[in-house]
Amino acid sequence: MKRILITGAAGFLGSHLCDRFIDEGFFVIGMDNFITGDKKNINHLLNNNHFQFVEHDVTEFVSIDDDLDYILHFASPASPIDYLKIPIQTLKVGSLGTHNLLGLAKAKKARILIASTSEVYGDPLVHPQTEEYYGNVNTIGPRGVYDEAKRFQESITMAYHRFHGLETRIVRIFNTYGPRMRLNDGRVIPAFMGQALRGEDLTVFGDGSQTRSFCFVDDQVEGIFRLLFSDYSYPVNIGNPHEISIKDFAEEIIKLTGTKQQIIYKELPVDDPLQRQPDISLAKKLLGWTPKIGRAEGMQRTFEYFKKLSPEELNKREHKDFSKHIKN
Ligand code: NAD
Ligand code: UDP
């Protein structure tokens, strides 16, 4: 049985990846320190004899007994509000954490795939974004802690590939959504869903003309799965190219949820990218991959998930308390 370590296992994407690899017949070791994740995302796996959970902060030395064939490094805060609240942890998990996992992959002769992001393109001056585009990132802006950590992560991954001959893969993930996103993580889909379900107005930042392109989690997981088993070491965009402005998206959510509330406008966060759409030609050519689930179906499935949250969960408005995870 092949053994895979998945970091960020209690998070949104990590938990779906654990499910997928268990379904594919792997033994999965999930690792997380719960800083932005939630145990409830993996509760259903804790008694599965093809799953082992290790609570650990990957910025500290990572030790795994026995062999490993693959590593997926998905540990990192991913929501702008999360990483603004824990900037140093965000920088550390992308840099020190990635270094630890590359070292582990080298020691175990395992193949490693790291989760990069469309944020490496910053506020892009090229549209749609192809993998060749170098990006437009403000290193010292508030988002810089995430963007630069991910850019460093790509660089050190390529260095391990070139210098040590390590088998590496890099996925540049564009906005992905679905069940198990944390309601109060501040990202636009859980934010709008929570507001609609609580009967609050939907908060659009800026004038809402900024665009995003939303990919349903099942499509993202399929793309990552195919990339891991490809022989391509350079970054690959995985996302859904169907672009929409945030204002139009808020209107779609008002229709979907049937809320009687309206849109209210709030200040646009600093360095919020004005447009984002993946060019997925490379993924199509290399992996034979295209997204299959449109926004209407994906959003309906996501809404069903949020609708089932308990009233206590739904009404817990405050952002997650990170204090017990912050040592420095
Ligand atoms: P998430 O916050 O739901 O999951 C991240 C998980 O990593 C959490 O469970 C958190 O507790 C864990 N974690 C963070 N720091 C850790 C540390 N030091 N040690 C151990 N565990 C730690 O976010 P997500 O949306 O599932 O994102 C997962 C990965 O995908 C991240 O690397 C993120 O940058 C990347 N990504 C996601 C998206 C998206 O749209 N969802 C887009 C681009 C990139
Ligand atoms: N956004 C918004 N209202 C919210 C939360 C987010 O208008 O309550 C906007 C945000 O400014 C950005 C887009 O929605 O333009 C996507 O934000 P998100 O935090 O989901 O991720 P990003 O793509 O910026 O990393």
Image (cartoon, helix red, strand yellow):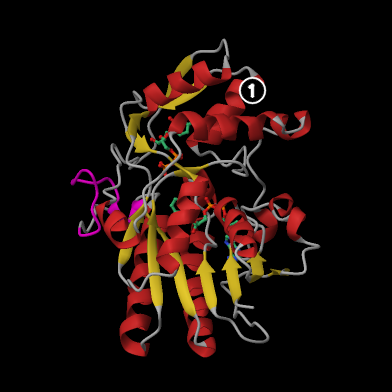
Q: How crowded is the residue under tag 1: few (<14 C-alpha within 10 Å), some, or many (20+)?
A: some
Image quarter (top left, top right, bottom left or bottom right) of the N terminus: bottom right
Q: Quadrant of ligand 1?
A: bottom right
Q: Quadrant of residue 211?
A: top left
Q: Amino acid at mark 1?
A: Leu
- Counting from the top left corner in percent of width and height, residue 319 is at 63, 40
Q: Circle 1 is placed at which residue position?
A: 197
Which portion, as a residue range, is magenta?
118-132
Q: Quadrant of residue 68?
A: bottom right
Does 1 appear above or below 267?
A: below
Q: Quadrant of residue 272?
A: top left
Task: Please check the rendered image and state whether residue 124 is part of the magenta-colored stretch, yes or no.
Answer: yes
- Counting from the top left corner in percent of width and height, residue 60 is at 60, 76
Element class at badge 1: helix
Does 100 appear above or below 41?
A: below
Residue drawn at point x = 34 percent, y = 64 percent: 151
Residue 50 seen in the figure? yes
In this rendered view, identify the residue nearer to me: 320 or 31: 31
Does 172 appear above or below 294?
A: below
Residue 153 seen in the figure? no
Tell whether 94 sits left or right of 5: left
Tell whether 275 sits left or right of 143: left
Residue drawn at point x = 71 percent, y = 55 percent: 42
| Most distant residue in the top direction | 260
